[in-house]
Amino acid sequence: MARNQDVDDDEFAGLDGDSGTDVQTQTSKLLDAPQDDAPGDVELVTDPAEAVIRLASSLPSLDDIAAVEEDDTSALTDAEQVQKAKTEEVILTAHAAGRAAVWVIGQGIAAASKGRWFRATHQTLEEYIADLVPDVVPRQARRWVKGSTVALAIAARTGQAPVEGQVRPLVEARGDSKLPQSVAVDMYVALATVAKETGAKVTAQVLKEFRDVVEDEALPKDPEEQQATLQEWAREVLVPGPNGPGMFETESNDGAGEDGANGDVQDAEVVETPHLDALDQALVDLKAARKAVKRTTFESAADEGDHDRYRLLVSELRTLTEELQRAARRAPAAVI
């Protein structure tokens, strides 16, 4: 079996999937899966489509919905209000379940890694995952594993799972510095609380700035005081003051951060823009590459003697830049 070079088993080392929340229980809350009599046990759906079908079956029947003309602006009837409320509940539940699913997968992979349940059939975890869920990109799976404990803990606290761009700033290591899980979760909850009150957005960039603040300041030891302090700092990051931005806020709060501005309509009221985030990150990476590669870089590389390698690198750089130029020229105009 061919080895997928994108995966390093060491990436999963030390991750045991213990998030403080039971994955199956959390999933059952989102999909209202029936639970067995035994506490904590969940009747798992064997057909992957069954849970979705069951959720869809709770939608109002299209035959029972009265057709309305496009120019009709009349108030909704009592029956329509009920149908609307039920439909919105199903939409939000499906949306929440979809967002939580990636973190459930991540914690499941962590569990498989710890127990090495693949040891009788596969040489490596990467081969096992590639066979089990072949459509999952390994690099993405690693992010799900690393973020699963924090993401599911956030879901348990807020009722909504965060997206990848929101989790990454909370779990990434900064040199030797790594946020304790409890602090990371409290930080997100504080931001989400203030965002819900003010209509601000919890973007990846905001989370990065908030982490800078938290790591530079001393948090109170008392849990209640700590949460109050975090909300105070969150407000400074999210809400402009009377004389302009708050003491911690920058212009980057207005848009997507480099790792993604994602969110949720129901709780944190942030906007999910994964493709804009990808373009933003690509631009950051290209600017960094442009600073690193100058004319003198080429001249010095040519003088280092490995001419075959030099020619290959220059050729690939030219091909890549031409492909990027063609892609940018073909980019559609924004629709207003």
Image (cartoon, rainbow, N blue to C red):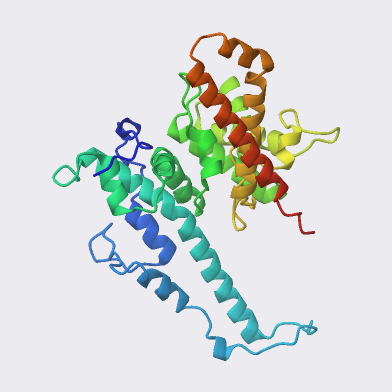
Viewed as shown, does residue 323 lie left or right of 242?
left
Which residue sits at x=68%, y=16%? Answer: 295
- Tell me the quadrant of the picture where the C terminus can be found: bottom right
Q: Is residue 113 visible?
A: yes
Depth check, front residue: 296 or 5 = 296
Q: Residue 242 is drawn in which quadrant?
A: top right
Picture mark count: 0
Viewed as shown, does residue 109 lie left or right of 195?
left
Depth check, front residue: 329 or 235 = 329
Q: Is residue 257 visible?
A: no
Which residue sits at x=44%, y=29%? Answer: 180
- Residue 190 location, x and y as percent? 59, 40
- Tell me the quadrant of the picture where the N terminus can be found: top left
* Figure check: 317 above or below 63: above
* Figure check: 82 above or below 296: below
- Residue 182 location, x and y as percent? 45, 35
Which residue sits at x=83%, y=33%? Answer: 244
Depth check, front residue: 203 or 273 = 273
